[in-house]
Amino acid sequence: MPDYAQIKKELEGLAVEDNPALVRQKSRDFYWYSPILKEELESVTADLVVSPKSEEEVIRVLKVAYAHGVPVTPRGAGTGNYGQAMPLSGGIVLNLINMNKVKEIHPGRVIAEPGIVIAELDRQTKAHSGQELRFHPSTAQTATIGGFVAGGSGGVGSIHWGGLRDLGNILRLRVVTMEAEPRVLDLTAWDLQKVTHAYGTNGIIVEVEMPLAPAYDWVDVLVGYDDFMDAVRFGDALAHKNGLLVKEIAPIAAPIPYDYFPRHKPFLRDRNQSIVVLMIAPHSMDAFTAFAERQKGEILFRSDKVESMKGIPHAYELAWNHTTLRALKVDPGFTYLQVQYPGPDHVAKVEKMTKLFGDEVPGHLEFIKFDGRMQCSGLPLVRYTTRERLEEIMQIHRDNGCPIFNPHRYTLEEGGMKQTDTVQLAFKKETDPKGLLNPGKMIAWDNPDFDFSAGKNYLFPGLAAAGG
Amino acid sequence: MPDYAQIKKELEGLAVEDNPALVRQKSRDFYWYSPILKEELESVTADLVVSPKSEEEVIRVLKVAYAHGVPVTPRGAGTGNYGQAMPLSGGIVLNLINMNKVKEIHPGRVIAEPGIVIAELDRQTKAHSGQELRFHPSTAQTATIGGFVAGGSGGVGSIHWGGLRDLGNILRLRVVTMEAEPRVLDLTAWDLQKVTHAYGTNGIIVEVEMPLAPAYDWVDVLVGYDDFMDAVRFGDALAHKNGLLVKEIAPIAAPIPYDYFPRHKPFLRDRNQSIVVLMIAPHSMDAFTAFAERQKGEILFRSDKVESMKGIPHAYELAWNHTTLRALKVDPGFTYLQVQYPGPDHVAKVEKMTKLFGDEVPGHLEFIKFDGRMQCSGLPLVRYTTRERLEEIMQIHRDNGCPIFNPHRYTLEEGGMKQTDTVQLAFKKETDPKGLLNPGKMIAWDNPDFDFSAGKNYLFPGLAAAGG
């Protein structure tokens, strides 16, 4: 057991929290979206939360933690869904929310500290020069940019720009290593792969440089169809219209919108209406409405035509993982999947899964650009019964050419490509020789011989040790 | 013969030119790119050039012309290549270059008069709010926005936005009809098809509303490869990189760059180097260079690294029809084609044509977005020998699944889809009952029974009558 009294002494002058209730609060994220993770990670908690205000303070914390052999798990706002920021072996949660300054804004790019909330970052770049991030998660109002880069993948705007993994969608990350004498590294271009979506397992991000796109007063639109597949086809057709500037296209199957979107429910006819959630540039609205009319889509809602938006959430807060959140809030019996429907026959694949599962797996798609091509990923809801049935549903997807990114696993590999990321592993060997950064998230570090093809769930030994 | 003395009297107060040399000058465009059009249109000239300064003056001219039964052919800067603005039956050239005011600039859109030069329009929107047109022709420094809309199709930036035909790439056109009492119509959305790329045959555009994109200080880049197909593959791969913001990708085969781009020649190694002409957003340059290196592309030129850009043309002035222009300037033995290589096997199609024709048809591609998918169109050069061989080269392309938009024809149909555009024809019946607007360009008007499948060249009777 590390000597936390001594550690606190060595961290004097920094914001350190050890009240168990508060520490526990800052040791959680939205892992409970998954009934499986809810069970596995319920008891996870850190020993201390340290909230540095600068790069220098981060370096101080890492030096102390390294000397004492204490794990450090970085945290933004804790809006992840797979325990990204949960300290599986206890130790220190490094809460970066106070490192929230915008440092520079230029045409096409911004430099900021990692803890700034994404919506606040967008507010500042918009006020400065009519710019905003290329894309953001549906949690933009609470999530931090550093947390997004370290634990997210894509979001609202990915229909134009793809995801964080795509070269050019992050410009630079400044990272502190976990060594006796922490180093500060600036990573660009290919080197960004080392730490993007690595959950902070191989470096602490202390500065981000992100590309910007033009900010518009996006119009929120809901288009209704009586058949979910008509909604999907409309979304697909719209995604392929070169001249219409659209930031978000998310078809969501009935009865989800009527049952779980209470503020938008008055705009829907009944439970049978599927919708497409959209964000359209104001100067594309005339052309868009002409297009929707020709596609026989019923425009149910336009944020530029309602009397007041008071109390009505942003369209993007109906989409991505907010769809799941809204359903879960009303009915805790839901969970969800993350599915890819590789093109060019992505619509046919969606149709097949829709027919196969019906209302057990209500459809929710997000159109995104994937290697320069439009396709859709899915975040379908699942009416959860048993762990076995959930596994079966996932396997049926895989058997039909629809890969699953499993949101019911807390490790990088099991949630991702089911293989060792050699780039991230090699970087961790350089930057975290003691393996103290966010332990338990990179199987390749803990158990290089783990057999991903065996179909077994990895159980991090350190989690059991910590009482998990 | 119309009574031009009387007409001039009725047009008193307007800028009217009847000096035959000056009128002839304003009756031409870049039709001479085609040896066939050069022969056919050589003697075309108007009787008068009238240069209105306002919508009211346009209405006055049309009223007078209608009363006298005189043809009116609208003209921007005359940078078209197919005689778009050439008055086949004489009459009045309506020179719109003095209607050149920017009226309003908003986020994402601009309202302007048709005669403003595109580069000047971009200068004003950029100075106002960091915005510019979504795409422009390579002739931006001289071409007008109205001429582009009426006679162009796409250009620099079409890799993101597609072409003028795509819904949303023009927001509104204000058009004056050719009637006893001319009407003024505002067209939006689907209605824009009526007059876009109609060469002014069914209305005079007096105001345009165009969408804007963010303006950046685009970096001009030339990347070299020893094999043209490597250059093509690089362009295709780059076009599919979601996160790299690129405005122009044009592979051009050796020896064109070395032989005909004198200002860039010092940056090339020798005649055997094919190049890719690029415009890259400054904030994408780091990622771009990392990508180019991995693709084994040799970066020959970067506008942000040369000592001085004095005397060096913009990259886009090496591309689109400026490639053709530069070759023609040195060697009048060239002409060119307009080819589509429909995807997804567009690269394989290019390879096949490249192998088949070799140096007789040096390759030049432009990557563009087509219905949401990346593909390439081509403007290959042709070492011209005979009319028969040119026709044969075009037929071989068609036989290999590569449609030709024939730049050696002056009619809308023969240069385009080889079929009647019923929308444009119906609109002409409404707006130009006497058929006085730009006569001879719409076959469907003059000869509804013309058989496009017979493979015969249409000869406008009015052209012969006018001495053409």
Image: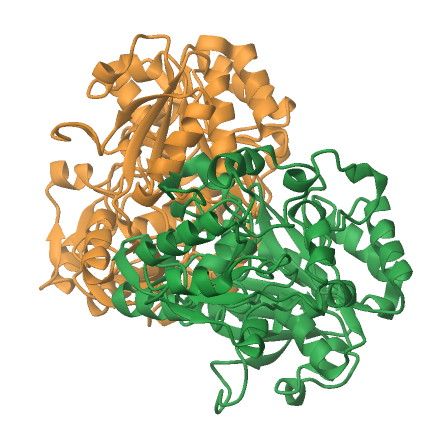
Chain colours: A orange, B green
Between A274 and B458, which is closer to the camera in this rendering?
Answer: B458
Q: Position of residue A82 (x, y in %)?
A: 37, 35
Q: Is residue A178 left or right of residue A230?
A: left
Q: Position of residue B116 (x, y in %)?
A: 39, 66
Between A427 and B261, which is closer to the camera in this rendering?
Answer: B261
Residue ID at (52%, 74%): B220
Residue ID at (49%, 9%): A358
Q: Let me know if residue B287 appears in the view.
A: no
Residue ID at (28%, 12%): A259
Q: Is residue B337 left or right of residue B105?
A: right
Q: Position of residue B136 (x, y in %)?
A: 49, 62
Q: Is residue A348 left or right of residue A462?
A: right
Between B403 and B287, which is closer to the camera in this rendering?
Answer: B403
Q: Quadrant of residue B13?
A: bottom left
User: For the C terminus of chain A, which image quadrant?
Assistant: top left
Q: Quadrant of residue B181?
A: top left
